[in-house]
Image: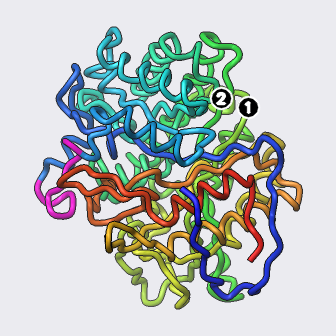
Amino acid sequence: MSNPATPPALGVLDERPPLTFPPGFLWGAATAAYQIEGAAAEGGRTPSIWDTFSHTPGRVVAGHTGDVACDHYHRLDADIALMAELGLKSYRFSVSWSRVQPGGSGPANAEGLDFYQRLVDRLLAHGIEPWLTLYHWDLPQPLEDAGGWPARDTAGRFADYTRLVADALGDRVRYWTTLNEPWCSAFLGYGSGVHAPGRSNGADAVRAGHHLMLGHGLAVQALRAARPSAEVGVTVNLYPVTPASDSPADADAARRIDGLANRFFLDPLLRGSYPADLLADLSTVTDFGHLRDGDLAVISSPLDLVGVNYYSRHVVAAPVDGVAPEKYWRSPSCWPGSEDVRFVTRGVPVTDMDWEIDAPGLVETLRRVHEEYTDLPLYVTENGSAFVDAVVDGRVDDTERLAYFDAHLRAAHEAISAGVPLRGYFAWSLMDNFEWAWGYTKRFGMIYVDYDSQARIPKSSARWYAEVIRRNGLAAQ
């Protein structure tokens, strides 16, 4: 996979020096179980909330489901061979809870665990470090029927499931992520309802967020007991939040959204407390009766690392006539207690998700986590972009995605130079996949997937990333 494409300059200097990353920097790519595995009803797997959601008319674009997805369940060996060809040092994947523990309770499903044991063994055989995420949004449907994440009992069930996975895989897996992006699980799943399970209730969203973090803390404790040598962390999706103007009203709008997007999770996880201003903002939504003595001590159980998923920046403003734009991802119902905040577009380049491209925001985000919250090692556990891709003469020349990666890796290097203990980077995503409520209409992958034939075609970004890994850095321009 040689002859990497050259990224467009995107307004930066035409001649940039080579950038070398620290020795041992962990280069990887990431996926999620429901987005790629398929085999939805095979091997003892039972429905998750995403099976139910995607099979509900009107929930997912074009009625797409993850029933087959990328058929990774049946194409495991070939997909790992592609990872090895890319030279990946690590692969971040998630475990399907309902494949391992059908129904969300009871003993482990041996056939489901066997799939992940084969995955881990084959990764290790190719010299690729497994990075296991326990929860990437696919709650077993019976647990949702019993109340879902707004119900406290779900946190305990998550700890039980964690023990099953740790007992089976902990002897071979070093790196563990408990939750992926709890903001999305809570506020998109239970606030706006644009993600599974599709509920729209601000109080439920706040309770879900707390119980997700409680489940995280209980899972950390379970992992420590089962596998003391494990490197345990959590992944949060973070955003720099910028006021649209210098006005006090816009500054307050930024404070409110920063509270919900970032501090709602960072403060309990890393400081053992909720910010006072956030509690005041949310007092119109909930009475916080779900908080119990000792919860925050569990939530802030010591970690070994923190994963940061970064995609874009939020620019916000105070309301105009009380009207806020209804946009996917930025819907007012995603932000309980702050529904009147306006999200402002700046006319800068965007991805196919309509997310503004803002590489400097990655530097801001990483520096903030390090300088304000923790000295723990940080990893960019997701970073990537959707663009419209086309196969031409057997090739996919995704120059826009390649340029996105180039800009954000330069930002990552800048953060390291500023003293951030950044230890690795995982591109999102290894391959095109089921993009949640957008179905198969949005492509994030470095590897193109033809969903009819399941053929894989490495894009230009994949060849370029392979060269980055080989060099442990970025070439001079």
Q: Secondary structure at mark 2?
A: strand
Q: Name the spot of residue 95 as percent of width and height, x first.
A: 41, 30
Q: Is residue 466 left or right of residue 189?
A: right
Badge 2 amino acid: Val
Q: Which residues are magenta?
A: 57-68
Main structural element of the magenta stretch: helix, strand or loop?
A: loop
Out of 199 and 10, give the one closest to the viewer: 10
Give the residue at mark 1: 304
Is 58 included in the stretch rendered in magenta?
A: yes
Q: Name the spot of residue 197 as percent of width and height, x first.
A: 28, 45
Q: Determine the CA span between mark 1 and mark 2.
A: 5 Å
Q: Which mark is residue 232?
A: 2
Q: Which mark is residue 398?
A: none
Q: Name the spot of residue 233 as percent of width and height, x first.
A: 64, 34
Q: Residue at x 83, y 57 (%)?
A: 416
Q: Residue at x 51, y 10 (%)?
A: 167
- Mark 1 touching mark 2, by CB under 8 A? yes
* Image quarter of residue 116: top left
Badge 1 amino acid: Asp
Q: Is residue 278 left or right of residue 334?
A: right
Tag 2 or tag 1, which sits nearer the N-term?
2
Check the image and report above or below for 431 versus 253.
above
Q: Name the spot of residue 218 as percent of width and height, x first.
A: 56, 22
Can residue 351 be spotted in the picture? yes
Out of 476 and 273, give the one closest to the viewer: 476
Out of 373 and 64, give the one closest to the viewer: 64
Q: Which quarter of the rendering shows the C terminus?
A: bottom right
Q: Residue at x 41, y 21 (%)?
A: 118
Q: Residues within 10 Å of mark 1 (few under 14, many from 20)?
A: some
Q: Which quarter of the rendering shows the N terminus?
A: bottom right
